[in-house]
Image: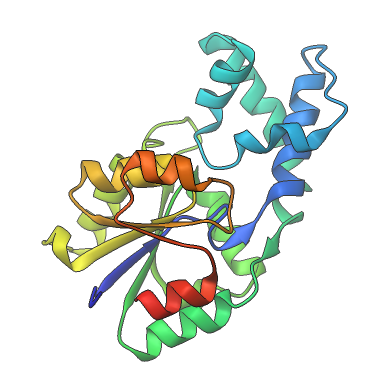
Amino acid sequence: MGKKYILFDLDGTLTDPKIGITQSVQYSLRGFGIEVEDADTLTPFIGPPLRDSYKEFYGFDDEQAELAVAKYREYFSETGIFENVMYDGIDTLLETFIKNDKVLIVATSKPTVFAKKILDHFNLSKYFTFVAGSELDGSRSNKGAIIRYAFENVGISSAGEAVMIGDREHDIFGANEMGVDSIGVLYGYGDLRELTAAGATHIVETVEELLNLL
């Protein structure tokens, strides 16, 4: 594709955070008297902004969503953050991009402070020029705003020089909002129907396909 700037979503794209996120949500819901026996049913929480997911899936109002996020972080900040696995081939992918003079950026709805800890944990920080995430108070959680923030801080002046890679529709919507090409990855938590409907420029099934495309 010949893109200089490559923006990556984190959850479901660089790492598989399923255990940590679903157990954090499970813990938070317990605080509201909601017991979810099968944590696998909470995988839709992976990717979108947390507050939005509590409102969409459990009908929480703004105040309840804030309380739920606070409860979520009680578990996530100490334990869930490291219940995470890097997808096979990601380190090789990133190393290859660096050798080919690509500028790599993380663009995630996860709070920046947590995203940086995860990248450090997997020894991935060295590959990335900038990490663009949300704030702890929930501001700048929209993916379009996150991509814009990355552009401003890295000094990207042309959308045509960049591509956004992610596994959920929010990644594609954000890219479209900024006029950026996008690649949907099927090894994460979005399916072909979701990524196609969102308008992904390209869709790949594996990390290897992603490397060959770029």
Q: Is residue 78 above or below residue 91?
A: above
Tell me where residue 31 appears, x and y as whole percent. Answer: 79, 18
Answer with left or right where residue 67 lies relative to residue 206. Answer: right
Q: Is residue 208 visible?
A: yes
Q: Quadrant of the C terminus?
A: bottom left
Residue 43: which quarter of the image? top right
From this view, report whether residue 55 is shown above or below residue 100: above
Please report the residue visible at 64 percent of the width from the left and 14 percent of the height from the top: 58
The answer to whether 101 appears left or right of 125 in the picture is left
Q: Nearer the viewer, residue 92 or 181?
A: 181
Residue at left offset 55%, top offset 63%: 14
Residue ID at (54%, 8%): 61
In the rendered image, residue 192, in percent from the top left (x then y), is placed at 48, 48
Please state if 21 lies on the left or on the right of 203 as rendered.
right
Please tell me whether residue 212 is drawn above or below residue 198 in the rendered image.
below
Residue at image x 53%, y 45%?
A: 190
Q: How many marks?
A: 0
Can residue 77 be seen at all in this image of the molecule?
no
